[in-house]
Amino acid sequence: MKILRLGVCVFSVASMVLGANAVFGADYPTKSIRMLCSGRGGGMDFTARLIAQALSGNLNQRVYVDNRPSGVIPGQVTSQAKPDGYTVLIAGSALWLLPLMRDNVPYDPMKDFSPITVAVTSTNILAVHPSLPVKSVKELIALAKARPGDLNFGTAGSGSASHLAGELFKALAGVNIVWVNYKAPGPAIMDLIAGRMQVTFGSARSTKAHVDAGKLKALAVTSPQRSPLYPDLPTIASALPGYELVAAFAMFAPAKTPAPIIARLNKEFAAVLKGEDLKKRLAKGGLVTVGSSPEQLTAMMKSDIARIGKVIKDVGIKG
């Protein structure tokens, strides 16, 4: 009887393993995959649709973008979804930084998601009004120290990448540049061009055109290395060691999604991100394709939470 029972147990375990492999292995995916995305019509939506289209072809299954209102909703929906590989999320750094700026965010960014990959990154550009008598980051820091409180920079909303980039610069440089909160990006850039504001840490996509037109003067990029899209611009870090701010769009699945599915998704995302056509189309939006490992994405999140989280706490930034 003991031998019979042992045989039944072995058979049952083997069946479970084989069943798991059938579900989570080569047969995945067998139906459409939903990609949750914040907002509609912006850079993230643009990126999501290009990736979803390419991924659909590689997987032979429809990958569709499910747009939800900005804020916490896409993350909340993803965190509560079934961890079966058929719901993924594309999100920016707000996913892991917003809980530091807002109470009662309905998810834990480090516990409620399975990281897949950093899909793309973009740098911000430190630029000034042409009338400002500076030609480098060092000269801007010297001017700001000589004129504390006289210079200002503006962003549309608290806690945006541009806002955090400026506050990080102020903290590391030890300067007092006044932040002005605008309701929308348009008035902020118009005031900058008109000379009513002197400094911006704007997105490359919104800043580069004005630099090319001679309406703004670019000094540096916020990324730790020079951007391949703007190779002539130095990094802020070359003059201000330790400075780093990179906007990233990353891919996640709900927590407890099986490891074989995460590995498959990581492989497929990496494959589409290597495509030259996709690279060129994303580059037009100021985006650089990456395709990292899940571990690299986790490390980036932890670094942001430690470095930028300190600034958020010290300044009292609310998102």
Image (cartoon, rainbow, N blue to C red):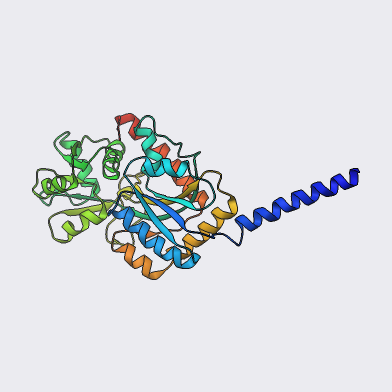
On screen, residue 132 versus residue 74, left or right, reads left
Q: Is residue 270 left or right of residue 186?
A: right
Q: In this view of the protein, can residue 304 be seen by the observer?
A: no
Q: Nearer the viewer, residue 109 or 138?
A: 109
Q: Residue at x 29, y 31 (%)?
A: 315
| Image position of 245 (left or right of 193) | right
Q: Quadrant of residue 301?
A: top left
Residue 56 in view of the camera: yes
* Image location of residue 154, percent across then percent down: 19, 41
Residue 226, by quadrant, is bottom left
Locate the N terminus by quadrant: top right
Q: How many circles with numbers are drawn on the protein? A: 0
Residue 53 x/y as whole percent: 40, 64
Q: Nearer the viewer, residue 2 or 169?
A: 2
Q: Which residue is rendered at x = 13% and y = 49% of the image?
A: 129
Q: Is residue 117 left or right of residue 224?
A: right
Query: Quadrant of the image for the C terminus?
Result: top left
Q: Nearer the viewer, residue 153 or 10?
A: 10
Instruction: Decide: is 176 above or below 245.
Output: above
| Residue at the farthest bottom position | 277
Across and down, in percent, residue 38 comes to 34, 48
Q: Residue sitting at 17 percent across and 54 percent down?
A: 217
Q: Is residue 111 above or below residue 220?
A: above
Spot occupied by residue 207 in the image (x, y as percentages of width and height): 21, 54
